[in-house]
């Protein structure tokens, strides 16, 4: 984007002083149309975050990421280690979806959907405004000596921050170990589950550190997504942008003076009031163009629109726009790049839906017992020994399980002695079994045998094994 007149660009991040120390950001409390929209989006997403681990669909937790047990629930669909390929495709869809929106609309995810932004701006920052006041009051309090007022305000704020961080950590734990297990742990008390309490306190400390001190540095330093935007954005991407053509005019910016004909004097509409800078949660000047720190939160849009309205100038000096729109007045278009991302997204989504529809509720795996070949019994019976594992992905017990051979005259004998057994809900059953087939049925020394798994005489799964027999020399 063209350099605005009289503007010197930074060579370091906006939250560092010239001495290399951190410059604390005290953003002005935003207000306006976009901020109201963001509040409603945030309320919905906060409600989703707080309730998602406790919502059940067909007995499955709506969202769960149990890394230790390698069990995942996504939108009520359970994913086991055997479904890892489905989990990978789901993650790829998420990544491409975010990339598609970044190419089209910049870091709109960061400003509107990212949990870091939502908690920071819509929870912790609003608590700060309520206790310490707006930008000016916060700056005065920061410079103030540690007297009774400062201790009271800061102490109360930090207590609330710690309490909310503890709540977030508990909800986060519910995503990891499951809400049912979490409620059991709470009922039994922390002493009985000290091994879980310690990680919970660590998570609480991390969240408190992030929202009480690290803050916008997460977006600037820690989050890799900010770096990705430099690769994904182009001059057709719609971002929060300053219209330098209109704002700078021929002779640059100028402070507002009543009854002055700015257009005749060659000055732009920007009155250099710095309100867009004061309201920015990452402390940047949007008039420098698209920057690493910008999270597209729209606070500067609302503030600039308010200023323009107060001096009877058109709104939209800062707005959602692309570089092409500002430079050439071009409207948004669905570019070949966007079409490519969309095509990949549709293909992967269709593939995932198809694989989910074809996925069985019970998965069977039958493997040859290591080191075993075959045994020849009486009456020309050839016996092979296998191990089996049945995984029940449903929320109900599957009863009366038994195995049958397809296309062969033979029997399956489960070592437990009971050829019919059950598999518990969201559990597994494993053991050893013998497959016995008449020698005359075998066509070679290695035969592919299909095994059918039945429940109450209903076929629920099929799998195959290689059945070994004596080599024929005919």
Image: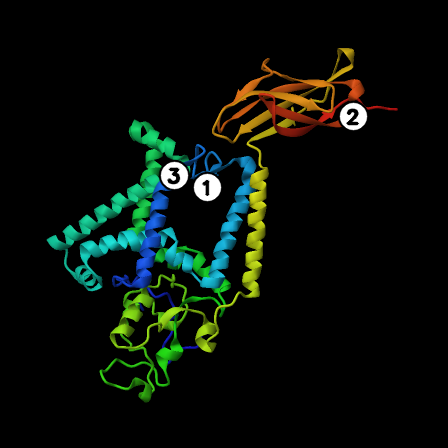
User: Which element type, helix, strand or loop, lies under badge 3?
Assistant: helix
Estimate the x, y position of residue 11 in percent, counting from the top left: 39, 70
Name the residue carrying label 1: 75
In whole angstroms, how far apart are the C-alphas of marks 1 and 2? 47 Å
Q: Which mark is residue 53?
A: 3
The residue furthest right is 474
| Of the image marks 1 and 3, the number of the one nearer the N terminus | 3
Q: Is residue 305 visible?
A: yes
Q: Is residue 147 visible?
A: no
Closest to the observer, 101 or 120: 101
Residue 238 lies in quadrant: bottom left
Q: Which mark is residue 445?
A: 2
Estimate the x, y position of residue 361 in percent, counting from the top left: 55, 32
Give the mark count: 3
User: Which element type, helix, strand or loop, lies under badge 2?
Assistant: loop
Estimate the x, y position of residue 462 in percent, counting from the top left: 64, 29
In whole angstroms, how far apart are the C-alphas of marks 2 and 3? 52 Å
Q: Are marks 1 and 3 in contact (CB under 8 Å)?
A: no
Residue 77 located left or right of residue 53: right
């Amino acid at each position: 984007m063209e350099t605005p007149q009289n503007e010197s660009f930074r060579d370091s991040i906006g939250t560092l002083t010239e001495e290399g120390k951190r410059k604390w950001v005290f953003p002005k409390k935003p207000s306006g149309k976009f901020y109201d929209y963001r509040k409603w989006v945030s309320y919905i997403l906060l409600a989703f975050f707080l309730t998602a681990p406790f919502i059940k669909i067909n007995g499955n937790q709506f969202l769960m990421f149990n890394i230790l047990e390698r069990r995942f629930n996504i939108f009520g669909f359970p994913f086991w280690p055997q479904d890892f390929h489905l989990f990978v495709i789901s993650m790829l869809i998420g990544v491409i979806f975010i990339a598609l929106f970044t190419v089209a609309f910049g870091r709109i995810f960061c400003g509107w959907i990212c949990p870091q932004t939502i908690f920071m701006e819509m929870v912790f920052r609003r608590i700060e405004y309520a206790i310490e006041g707006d930008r000016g009051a916060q700056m005065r309090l920061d410079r103030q000596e540690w007297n009774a007022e400062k201790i009271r305000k800061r102490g109360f704020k930090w207590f609330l921050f710690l309490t909310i961080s503890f709540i977030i950590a508990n909800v986060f734990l519910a995503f990891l170990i499951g809400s049912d297990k979490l409620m059991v742990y709470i009922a039994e008390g922390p002493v009985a589950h000290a091994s879980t309490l310690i990680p919970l306190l660590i998570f609480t400390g991390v969240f408190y550190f992030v929202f009480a001190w690290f803050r916008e540095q997460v977006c600037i330093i820690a989050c890799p997504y900010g770096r990705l935007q430099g690769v994904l954005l182009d001059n057709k991407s719609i971002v929060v942008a300053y219209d330098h053509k209109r704002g700078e005019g021929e002779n640059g910016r100028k402070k507002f003076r009543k009854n002055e004909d700015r257009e005749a004097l060659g000055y732009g509409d920007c009155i250099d009031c710095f309100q867009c800078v004061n309201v920015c949660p990452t402390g940047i000047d949007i008039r420098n163009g698209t920057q690493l720190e910008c999270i597209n939160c729209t606070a500067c849009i609302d503030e600039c629109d308010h200023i323009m309205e107060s001096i009877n100038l058109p709104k939209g000096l800062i707005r959602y726009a692309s570089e092409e729109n500002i430079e050439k007045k071009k409207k948004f278009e669905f570019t070949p790049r966007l079409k490519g991302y969309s095509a990949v997204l549709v293909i992967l989504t269709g593939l995932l839906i198809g694989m989910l529809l074809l996925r069985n509720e019970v998965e069977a795996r039958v493997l040859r017992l290591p080191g075993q070949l075959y045994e020849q019994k009486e009456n020309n019976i050839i016996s092979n020994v296998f191990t089996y594992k049945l995984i029940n992905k449903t929320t109900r017990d599957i009863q009366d399980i038994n195995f049958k051979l397809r296309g062969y005259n033979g029997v399956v004998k489960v070592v437990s002695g009971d050829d019919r057994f059950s598999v518990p809900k969201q559990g597994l059953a494993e053991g050893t079994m013998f497959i016995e087939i008449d020698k005359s049925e075998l066509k070679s020394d290695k035969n592919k045998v299909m095994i059918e798994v039945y429940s109450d005489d209903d076929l629920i799964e099929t799998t195959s094994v290689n059945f070994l027999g004596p080599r024929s020399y005919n």
